[in-house]
Amino acid sequence: MLYDFNYYNPTKIYFGKDSMKNLSKELACYGKNILLLYGKNSIKKIGLYDEVLKILNECGKNVTELSGIKPNPSYSQVLEGARLVRENNIDLILAVGGGSVIDCAKAISVSSYAKGNPWQRYWIDFEEVDNEIVPVGSILTMTGTASEMNAGSVITNEEVTVKTGRVFNPDVNPKFSILNPELTYSVPQKQMVSGIFDVMSHLMEQYFSGEDDNTTDYVIEAVMKSLINSSKTAINNPKDYEARSNIMWCATLGLNSVTGLSKTQDWQVHNIEHQLGAYTDCPHGLGLAVISMPYYRYIFKNGIDKFVRFAKNVWNVNPDGKTKEEIAREGISCLESFAKELGIPLTLRELGATEDMLEKIAFSTYEGGGYKYMTHKDILNVLKECY
Amino acid sequence: MLYDFNYYNPTKIYFGKDSMKNLSKELACYGKNILLLYGKNSIKKIGLYDEVLKILNECGKNVTELSGIKPNPSYSQVLEGARLVRENNIDLILAVGGGSVIDCAKAISVSSYAKGNPWQRYWIDFEEVDNEIVPVGSILTMTGTASEMNAGSVITNEEVTVKTGRVFNPDVNPKFSILNPELTYSVPQKQMVSGIFDVMSHLMEQYFSGEDDNTTDYVIEAVMKSLINSSKTAINNPKDYEARSNIMWCATLGLNSVTGLSKTQDWQVHNIEHQLGAYTDCPHGLGLAVISMPYYRYIFKNGIDKFVRFAKNVWNVNPDGKTKEEIAREGISCLESFAKELGIPLTLRELGATEDMLEKIAFSTYEGGGYKYMTHKDILNVLKECY
């Protein structure tokens, strides 16, 4: 069964070594007041802050800054950004950084002129945005989330210890995103592999659903294979331009809708990780990696044919003389070996979780799933396997 | 080497059995005056004409019609459409049909308010459009060209016997396209396989270039494999919804830019076919099929590694104990077998070409190419192999 779908993705992508040359052309489309959003000091260390500020000045823009956006961007920062947007009559929010900064920019974009409480309305009750959306542009420095080409925004509300994501409609997409693979060279190895596994996880969570022969599944396998191949190069040579380019584009394709079309999808690994992130603040991709293998071993019998296909098509597992279960398990083991090759820790303990957190994480995660419906009890079983 | 690229594709896609329900919502975004563009009577036979007209009436639109758009749409029809646009103050051109009708709609869109001679300025001198672009929407009934999600427009100028294509900027893309796979059921088998080979050809012409490890190549292989798989089903059971859906979406992905990103590409097979089309008016995809195998056998040694990869990854050719040349040739033979399985004729003679046309076609085709630069002489050599 192929499901009906709508596809609309209006983000302009400028990709490559010289992609920054397009910034001034894009800036010309917006008014004078810019909110420049970034994380800690990394964009200053690599000279990117100076470069962007120079272009903004040359274009005659008034720049307001909000820095220190956290890896799990907090709702209090969203409110701070929204206040700056209103006070400075901001025309464009320019996010310079990774997915966290861009997610935060989108959250500020929809919250600035919201009626009522934006957290409750947009992240809890999933209401449609009925207020002005402030345009967002992005300059990406870290790959993984595909936030540069989608309308997703994951925010942590520290007051209630809830981290939750929301995909808005495409009007909230960045209007433009500048993707220069060289800007990702300075990302620490741990962050790079976290990003890589985040992409792998996005692809798997879209892939492991349905029993049809869907073009999208072929496309997902292609992106997985390119990602795996280039990651193995990048782990040994982080300045391999071709490898880092491919990883960057795989990341964007991994969650810009193209790899999800007509798929029912199963986002339970992400749901669990979001709660893990709310409790431990661990890097998102590492959390996903720790959860993925136990999760897929827990559910694979409910979607055995797809796991067999995954083993054969993505990992070239030779099926001769093996049962479906053996082939499927071998595929998941290949995934695990890949995570090890990237140097990813494989227990929750190593990510700073303590045993008493497991129940809290399990019971604050939404029940649901794909091939198998996961109750809180099931989620707790998986978390115990990860610990 | 991965090349910098820009990607921007603002077409909204509504895909599936119930996708027509989105038409009235889209129509509400435009003014009252609609130019309804279609081919011969096929949309009347399947009841689509009545369905669309009913929706247009319910939305209170004034409808002007231009029908009889040819499989190779002619420049005289473009001028006729442009006149109707001006006379009726058209707000939206609604193309109902296959790629020809949509290509013609885009040509009318850019030509209606052009200064000077649009043929010369836009299709010969490739100037940027500097006049009003009339919005286009499409309802697709035949797959192949991806015209529903790109800015391409191939037009035949009968006065000078030149058929030539042009990709405009994304402002010329259809604003929305409605893709219902069931609407393609009534397409005659010959047209269906012509469309399928057109898609395969688009994919190959993007794939056979470069020597890098590019994510796009993986994506192209994926779309090829899904297309081949579903085509083998559809040829025996044209009403298999899953197969026709996949073919329809493969066609769109095949030329909506996603499968061309960062690729230098080699469009020489299309260039030759366009001239063949100008002389014989044969179905586009069949012309491509006849030219493809001799063309790729003529050039493969200049890009041997890519042809080996094609054989192994797309056709599962077992490389054991074979030379690169043998593997590459086997891949091209698999492509030929696929064309035969689809029932495609494999000589120019069967498509209505006569021997005296060969030189005319060869010498009116642009020189150029990818792995191998093709002179007029080279093109003639290939055409003789096809005859």
Image (cartoon, coloured by chain):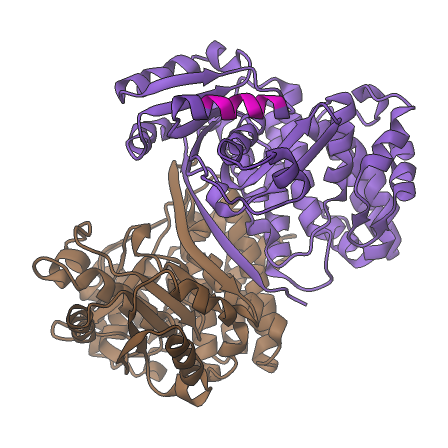
Chain colours: A brown, B purple
Q: Is residue B41 above or below residue B197?
A: above
| Residue B115 appears in the figure | yes
Which x, y percent locates residue B21?
A: 32, 28
Q: Is residue A321 above or below residue B284?
A: below
| Residue A325 appears in the figure | no
| Horizontal relation, residue B28 to residue A58: left or right | left
Observer-nearest residue: B307 or B269?
A: B269
Is residue B80 a member of the stretch shown in magenta? yes
Which x, y percent locates residue B282?
A: 73, 22
Q: Is residue A269 above or below residue A141?
A: above
Residue occupying image coordinates x 61% and y 52%: B260
- Quadrant where the C terminus of chain A is found in the figure: bottom left
- Quadrant where the N terminus of chain A is found in the figure: top left
| Horizontal relation, residue B55 to residue B218: left or right | left
Observer-nearest residue: B115 or B96?
A: B115
Residue occupying image coordinates x 61% and y 20%: B70
Is residue B134 a member of the stretch shown in magenta? no
| Horizontal relation, residue B48 to residue B261: left or right | left
Task: Write down the quadrant of residue B256 in the picture.
Answer: top right
Which x, y percent locates residue A298?
A: 37, 59
Observer-nearest residue: A309 or B24?
A: B24
Q: Which residues are magenta?
A: B76-84
